[in-house]
Image (spheres, rainbow, N blue to C red):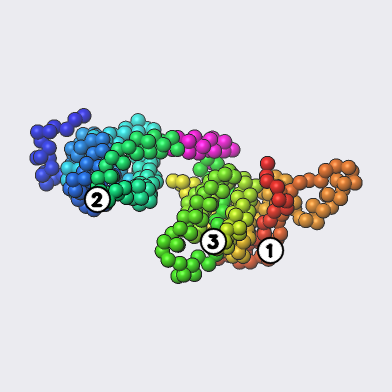
């Protein structure tokens, strides 16, 4: 469906049209009116590959969706209201049509389509802000005296845009394939949503004191180094970084052994970096609800509480995590039992069991909101890598 250009001006003035339509993704300042800056408009057209053509009402009508549904989609993507300014393009119409089409075809329910819009908007908004703040800002420093940033930005974006777009799609497909693989391997349908995972928090000790002592730039560099180190270690050893919270990261793994290795690697790596504060880690194992890339539930809350009571440079785990490590043969039920088993194996001329981790029970203690828990101190029983 195409808009009737002869009525575009009249449509924009109709008092009966809804006025609360959010701003599209190309209005970067998030104000209620789209920018009129000539360079910003040129960059917008370059990035979107189209000129402004529609008011929100015209875009919804051309896409064949109600204004109410269109508004819900755009708000879910995180865009501010623009009233009835002519600021939308063919791409905006196509996006509306696609989402509405998925609902009409029965492939997605309307609430699920809203969730798709919201999760995509939140993720890409953070990515775009990072690229502008940390990436493009540095690259667009004028290379020669007398040149303005304006003269550098347009050709740079023109060169980077197709490369970055292809790379983002590639990474998304890779991540989607990995996530789909994890879900289809679930034991049953219920586990596809509520899964049993190992969830861990890694927390910098004394970070609040550091914020009072360090300059803002130094603090920012420390946080970036911490997050980068954690992200690399978690990914390298088979875990998933769920989110970063400045002085804390949340990660998950499908099995207890992987989570244990990640936690100990984090402690060991940070301990060898004099620029980093001490670290503490808490891990719990159990049923976790996953929503929009995040994890929720009692298991997550328990991991957080264990982190808050862990001494520096240590890893505390809950009883379920300890049981899982013992069940999979990666830790002995007790050091006494391990010693007895080793002696018996030696008598029989066999190699004793090889355990990667050790567990030491700690004093039971009440944990706010979760009752009494018995933490276990996690350690390494050998210096070799896990196979």
Mark sitting earlier along the chain (1/3): 3
Residue located 49% across and 46% down the image? 290
**Relative to the observer, which residue lies in front, 144 or 354?**
144
| Label number found at residue 146 | 2
Q: Is residue 184 magenta?
A: yes
Percent coordinates x, y for residue 114 in the rendering = 35, 43
Name the residue rendered at 76%, 46% in the picture. Answer: 354
Q: Secondary structure at mark 3?
A: loop
Total marks shown come to 3
Q: Secondary structure at mark 2?
A: loop
Q: Is residue 253 visible?
A: yes
User: Image check: 21 left or right of 262?
Assistant: left
* Pointer 3 residue: 275
Residue at x 42% of width, y 66% of height: 215
Return the disc, 1 or 2, that comes first in the chain's sequence: 2
In the displayed structure, 240 sits above or below 308; it is above
Question: What SS does tag 1 mark?
Answer: loop
Residue range highlighted in magenta = 172-190
Task: Residue 192: give x, y in percent of width and height.
Answer: 52, 40
Marks 2/3: CA distance? 39 Å
Residue 162, horizontal then vertical, whole percent? 34, 35
Spatial CA span between label 1 and label 2: 66 Å
User: What secondary structure prevails in the magenta region?
Assistant: helix
Kindly report which numbered mark, 1 or 2, lies closer to the viewer in this rendering: 2
Whether residue 99 appears in this view of the structure is no
Q: Which residue is mark 1?
A: 362
State yes or no: discs 2 and 3 in contact (Cβ < 8 Å).
Answer: no
Q: Residues within 10 Å of mark 1 (few under 14, many from 20)?
A: few
Foreground mark, 2 or 3, reads: 2
Is residue 341 left or right of 119 when viewed as pictured?
right
């Amino acid at each position: 469906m195409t808009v009737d250009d002869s009525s575009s001006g009249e449509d924009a003035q109709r008092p009966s049209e809804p006025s609360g339509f959010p701003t599209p993704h190309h209005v970067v300042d998030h104000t209620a009116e789209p920018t009129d800056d000539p360079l910003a408009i040129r960059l917008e057209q370059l990035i979107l590959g189209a000129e402004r053509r529609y008011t929100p009402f015209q875009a919804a009508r051309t896409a064949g969706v109600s204004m109410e549904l269109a508004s819900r989609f755009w708000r879910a993507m995180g865009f501010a209201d623009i009233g009835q300014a002519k600021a939308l393009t063919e791409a905006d119409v196509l996006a509306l049509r696609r989402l509405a089409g998925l609902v009409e075809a029965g492939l997605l329910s309307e609430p699920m389509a809203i969730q798709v819009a919201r999760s995509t908007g939140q993720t890409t908004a953070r990515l775009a802000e990072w690229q502008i703040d940390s990436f493009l800002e540095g690259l667009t420093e004028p290379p020669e005296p007398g040149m303005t940033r304006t003269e550098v930005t347009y050709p740079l974006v023109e060169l980077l845009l197709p490369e970055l777009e292809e790379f983002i799609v590639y990474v998304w497909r890779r991540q989607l394939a990995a996530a789909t693989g994890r879900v289809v391997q679930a034991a049953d349908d219920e586990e596809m949503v509520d899964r049993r995972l190992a969830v861990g928090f890694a927390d910098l000790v004394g970070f609040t004191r550091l914020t009072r002592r360090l300059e803002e730039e130094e603090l920012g560099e420390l946080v970036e180094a911490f997050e980068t180190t954690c992200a690399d270690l978690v990914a390298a050893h088979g875990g998933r970084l769920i989110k970063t919270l400045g002085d804390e990261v949340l990660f998950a793994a499908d099995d207890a052994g992987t989570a244990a290795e990640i936690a100990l690697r984090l402690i060991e790596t940070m301990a060898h970096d004099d620029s980093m504060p001490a670290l503490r880690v808490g891990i719990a194992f159990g049923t976790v609800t996953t929503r929009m890339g995040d994890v929720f539930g009692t298991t997550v809350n328990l991991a957080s509480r264990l982190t808050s009571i862990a001494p520096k440079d240590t890893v505390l785990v809950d009883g379920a995590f300890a049981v899982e490590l013992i069940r999979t043969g990666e830790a002995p039920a007790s050091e006494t039992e391990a010693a007895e088993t080793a002696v018996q194996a030696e008598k029989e001329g066999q190699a004793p069991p090889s355990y990667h981790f050790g567990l030491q029970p700690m004093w039971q203690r009440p944990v706010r909101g979760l009752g009494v828990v018995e933490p276990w101190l996690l350690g390494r029983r050998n210096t070799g890598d896990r196979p």
